[in-house]
Image (tube, rainbow, N blue to C red):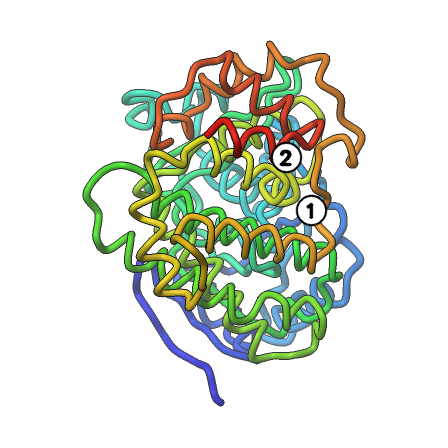
Amino acid sequence: MTLSGNWNYPTQMVFGAGVLAKLPEKCAALGMTKPLLITDEGLKDSAIVAKSLEIMAAANMPAGLFAGVKGNPTGENVMAGVAAYKDGGYDGVIAFGGGSGIDAAKAVALMVGQDRPLWDFEDIGDNWLRVNVAGVAPIVAVPTTAGTGSEVGRASVISNADTHEKKIIFHPKMLPAVVIADPELTIGLPAHLTAATGIDAFVHCFEAYCAPGYHPMADGVALEGMRLIKENLVTAYKNGADIEARSHMLVASSMGATAFQKGLGGVHALAHSLGGLYDKHHGLLNAILLPYVMVKNRSAIAARMELLARFMGLEGANGFDAVYNWIIELRAELGVPHTLAEIGMDDKDAAKIGVLSVNDPSAGGNPIALSADEYADLFVQAVHGQLDQARQAA
């Protein structure tokens, strides 16, 4: 099957195996003559970064490289990127990598033309109106994982190293003008990252679908995204060279981020808090936390699970149990830990996690309004694997 396309929802997407070759053309169309490719530390010496730089050089548009971005990007990472951009005299940004690299790159593109601190643009109220729009650099995004969908987002999640909080930086101009979505770039992704990022994409779709409010377009995108993930994630995990499975997962990732304009929920509220405090992988945190939050929300999402179970072809006594049991089985098949303790966490900061989570912007999209104490309890359950007890209580 040939999978390709040229889409404009929510932004222009050039999709298909080998489309990385179009990178110079798309940069030039945005007026770039000397772009800066921004990515994370792990990709600095990778073959896919080297190939991208070679493609740009061959088109007489040599690109610079900034790879000083952590797995959970910080404000310091962003401002170091801004300094590199200005020192090199660059005129555009290639946001390259997974969520960390792309989030940092979008924030750099925002900040190169601002005279306010980064945190002045946190996604609160009308802060986004403070942005000098003319100063935002053009962005082309090149995703290399199928998880966050940051390539189609208008925001970046950046950690404040002083407070250990994750903050959402937002402006509509942070949406990349063009996405180069080449599934060949995801073939080398290790199996454990394929699993974590893949479930991250599923959680985006799932929480968007369950978020309150009327948004049938987001619901439809989320439903199809979850079906694509069900049909392709395990294949991509077991055979990373399966280009068709990788293609479907790359699309599903963008679909998740498109859908969550409707909202996210408690899984992300907790994952953002834990990622900021403990510097753990965001997708892995979501994968561990999902069933705990799902059980907590059961009374509010049970009806939605009936449709989801039918759409995904899942069988069970009821829709909720069918979806829940499939998620538990999927996590086991992908080698995802069942508890936070298995990734080195304890519950001593439960109260702090509760406060951070209830104040996270994602908490507003949870189907049930949870208190700080309830978020703290969910965290403790996930540390100790108290899922059976939580199901009985629900």
Specify whether residue 30 is in view. Answer: yes
Q: Is residue 366 left or right of residue 196?
A: left
Residue 219 locus on image (x, y percent): 29, 53
Inter-mark Cα distance, 2 to 1: 9 Å
Q: Residue at x 55, y 44 (%)?
A: 105
Relative to 196, 119 lies left or right: left
Q: Which badge, 2 or 1, comes first in the chain's sequence?
A: 1
Q: Amino acid at mark 2?
A: Pro
**Of 131 and 309, the residue lying toward us:** 309
Q: Position of residue 349 (x, y in %)?
A: 68, 13
Mark 1 — residue? 40
Q: Is residue 379 toward the left or the right of residue 70 in the image?
A: left
**Is residue 222 or residue 133 the one in the foreground?**
222
Q: Residues within 10 Å of mark 2 (few under 14, many from 20)?
A: many
> Front-most of 57 and 351?
351
Residue drawn at (39%, 48%) of the image: 175
Residue furthest bottom in the image: 1
Kind of residue sitting beneath label 1? Asp
Image quadrant assignment for residue 14: bottom left
| Residue 379, picture quadrant | top right
Marks 2 and 1: CB-CB under 8 Å? yes
Q: Tell me the tag on residue 73.
A: 2
Mark 1 Cα within 10 Å, few/some/many (few <14, many 20+)?
many
In the rendered structure, find residue 183 and report the number of the disc placed on it.
none
For residue 87, above or below residue 334 = above
Q: Is residue 191 above or below residue 44?
A: below
The local secondary structure at tag 1 comes to loop
**Residue that appears at 70% across and 72% down:** 240
- SS at circle 2: loop
